[in-house]
Image (spheres, rainbow, N blue to C red):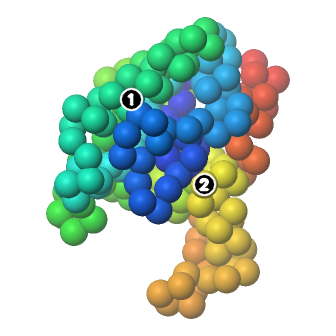
């Protein structure tokens, strides 16, 4: 069974620069819930791989985060699918942990849990750190143009460069690009 490893904010749900701090703020991107359900029905295992530094910043509690994820589980289940696992980093950017993307630990944990080789998995993200973490774990990556995806793509094409260095960003080799999670699901389901 193949494994889909999705970033959460900006891939499954609308992102916010103020963080998603409650279930009420969790708003799916059009077609994303149905895409996860369709892939689940087709035999894909679905895992969410997400940095949640809002915990370390005190913006929400672990119980609130569980409630947000319960809403995600229920929405996908109502659409006829399932989310098999959620892997998260609760640390802030300066914690120096091994689990915060772009570090590969969350991806590696998912591969071990599901007994899947990297080439039998696919990671989806909207930011360079999502793609880098997957690539370091040997997992093929997909950039979606939702969330930060358009900016990430533009920077990779050298259109605006990295704001801090003025350099263009480099996507991991062989990164695919899709409009959104629904378009990726269409492509994957056509292939199988």
Which quadrant does the C terminus fall into? top right
Which quadrant does the N terminus fall into? top right
Please give left or right for residue 59 compared with residue 173 in the image. left
Where's residue 190, x and y in %?
82, 23
Q: Which residue is labeled 2 in the image?
A: 147
Viewer-proximal residue, 182 or 69?
A: 69
Label 2 – label 1 distance at C-alpha: 18 Å
One can see residue 137 in this view: no
Give the SS element for disc 1: helix
> Tag 2: Cα neighbours inside 10 Å, few (<14), some, or many (≥20)?
many
Mark sitting earlier along the chain (2/1) = 1
Please give left or right for residue 128 compared with residue 91 in the image. right
Q: Which residue is labeled 1 in the image?
A: 69
Residue depicted at x 71% and y 31%: 31
Residue depicted at x 57% and y 47%: 14
Give the SS element for disc 2: loop
Viewer-proximal residue, 172 or 125?
A: 125
Residue depicted at x 42% and y 60%: 18
Question: Which residue is outermost to the bottom?
Answer: 166
Where's residue 89, x and y in %?
28, 46
Where's residue 191, x and y in %?
78, 24
> Tag 1: Cα neighbours inside 10 Å, few (<14), some, or many (≥20)?
some
Viewer-proximal residue, 67 or 79?
A: 67
Viewer-proximal residue, 102 or 55?
A: 55
One can see residue 74 in this view: yes
Residue depicted at x 67% and y 17%: 38
Mark 2 touching mark 1, by CB under 8 A?
Answer: no
């Amino acid at each position: 069974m193949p494994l889909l490893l999705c970033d959460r904010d900006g891939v499954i749900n609308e992102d916010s620069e103020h963080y998603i701090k409650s279930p009420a703020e969790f708003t799916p991107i059009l077609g994303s819930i149905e895409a996860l359900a369709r892939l689940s029905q087709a035999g894909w295992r679905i895992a969410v791989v997400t940095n949640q530094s809002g915990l370390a910043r005190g913006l929400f509690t672990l119980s609130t985060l569980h409630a947000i994820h319960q809403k995600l589980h229920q929405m996908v289940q109502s659409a006829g699918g399932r989310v098999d696992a959620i892997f998260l980093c609760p640390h802030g950017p300066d914690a120096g942990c091994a689990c915060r993307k772009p570090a590969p630990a969350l991806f590696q944990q998912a591969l071990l849990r599901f007994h899947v080789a990297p080439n039998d998995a696919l990671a989806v993200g909207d930011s360079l750190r999502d793609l880098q973490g997957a690539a370091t774990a040997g997992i093929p990556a997909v950039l979606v143009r939702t969330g930060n995806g358009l900016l990430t793509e533009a920077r990779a094409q050298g259109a605006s460069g990295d704001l801090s260095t003025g350099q263009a960003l480099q996507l991991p080799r062989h990164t695919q690009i899709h409009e959104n999670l629904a378009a990726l699901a269409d492509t994957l389901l056509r292939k199988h």
